[in-house]
Amino acid sequence: MEKQVGDRGSVTDRGGPVIDTALRRAFQAALGPDAVLDDPLQLRTYECDGLTGFRRVPALVLLPRDTEEVAAAVSLCAEAGVPFVARGAGTGLSGGAVPVAQGVVVSLARMRRVLEFDPEDRRTVVEPGVTNAEISRLAAPHGLHYAPDPSSQVVCTIGGNVAENSGGAHCVKYGFTVHHVHALRVVLPDGSTVRLGGDAPETAGPDLRGLFIGSEGTLGIATEITVRLLRSPEGVRTLVADFPTARQAGDAVGEIMAAGIVPAAVEMLDALAIEACEAAVGAGYTRGTAAALVVELDGLDEECEEQFRDVVAVCRRQGTTKIRVAADARERALVWKGRKAAFAAMGRISPDYFVQDGVVPRTRLAEALDRIAEMSKARGLRVANVFHAGDGNLHPLVLFDEKAGETERAERLSRDIAEMCVELGGSLSGEHGIGLDKACSMPRMFGEDDLAAMERLRKAFDPDGLSNPGKVLPTPRLCGEPPGRYRPHPLETAGVVERW
């Protein structure tokens, strides 16, 4: 699990609606007494997501069991003017599931049913608490699978994937969550329910389904998700290629894609990431190599073999020092176990770290890696790189030690890397979302008119601003604060003003 420090969001909010006894009893009547948590120790469990530097303790946590109970809970929130935050498994990495201090968390952990499964039409309808990996396990006996595969797929839920438009290692060929969801049943912020999308991949009219996916819980709560399933490929070939420099590995990615080859996955790990992964998993990566590419091809057997030979040739032209080909499914699984353990494995080589999620054009991948190395050296902090190289989705991990006073420097470096991605023509986020972490950087990517349009659209769904408030879009209160641990203003210390 990601280790982070800091109390950037730990100060209790003041001035909002208070959840009184009558409202608490109304929640209990609608959901049942065991579905309303108010014990302080239990509430602490929900104070943050995977980005643990932002923390707030909610007033209540609600545990609905179905769409009707979610709608009842949200209706009560709307009537009382109480903000709410939907939460899945809490594995997000942008502070998107951080509660509002005087609001409620609507946990979807109990909504884990598979409502429909139709292998002939290659679709299934699930509740948001079903994990990503469970869908593929359900489909596997029928020769099917669910394509998006975030590194946390064993524990992350499909509801969270919808909120963040998650991708994963195989997104370069198969796309993101938005490409694999046909329809959503959604509880809107006033408690009403609607169906977005349809049984077919495309429907007439505005694409409200696509609009909702990736909205980070700011437009409502998805309670039923219809996903499409794909045929499992006939052939799969996987290799790990070592390179003497990260730039050569990046150039190899560019040449592979320029050749018209579309791998199922192209992942890159640098020396620090390899060191951590090997310490944690022992997947057989070469310690000491500057960079390694994991390339996987799938499809028809003959096509797969031909393209695999072309990829090997590209790697050799770019100066690979070693090519390891997975001999069977067991070895392939071990390669991926090492790659997907990378974030958690960082605790083996650093007491603390921040993970970023910027995107750059593939043609500028090598330049981005050089820039990160320069920024790392200038700040005197190590940065481990492990990322989806095929679509330029970087995941630099800024390593630091809070006890050595490095937290603020690490936060600035992490923010600067994200904004550098925008400067190179990319994006602040590829799949982790904006949340609280990068809201203040949004003006670097969007103009005032763009942000105003987003705000108007958000208010069309949620005019009272109750659904996951304070996320994604910058606010003066949030962005006027310096990064790092909260520091009281001198007037606050003197008792002249109070923070709210």
Image (spheres, rainbow, N blue to C red):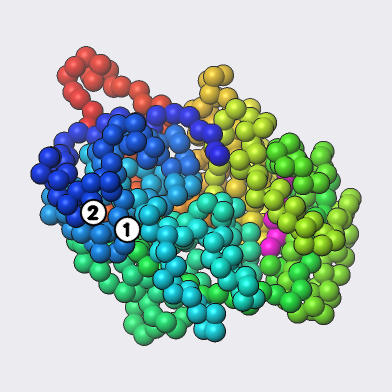
Q: Which residue is mark 2?
A: 31
Q: Is residue 396 visible?
A: yes
Residue at the (79%, 56%) spot, across then down: 331
Residue 358 pos. (x, y %): 55, 51
In the image, is residue 266 part of the stretch drawn in magenta? yes
Q: Nearer the viewer, residue 244 or 122?
A: 122
Determine whether label 2 and label 1 are within 8 Å by CB: yes
Three-letter code for the amino acid on which mark 1 is drawn: Arg
Q: Position of residue 326 (x, y in %)?
A: 82, 59
The span picked out in magenta is: 265-270
Quadrant of the drawing holding the C terminus: top left
Residue at 77% x, 50% y: name it: 292
Left or right, 450 with respect to 137, comes to left
**Seen in the image, is 383 located left or right of residue 417?**
right
**Residue behind mark 1:** 65
Pick out the residue farthest to the top.
494
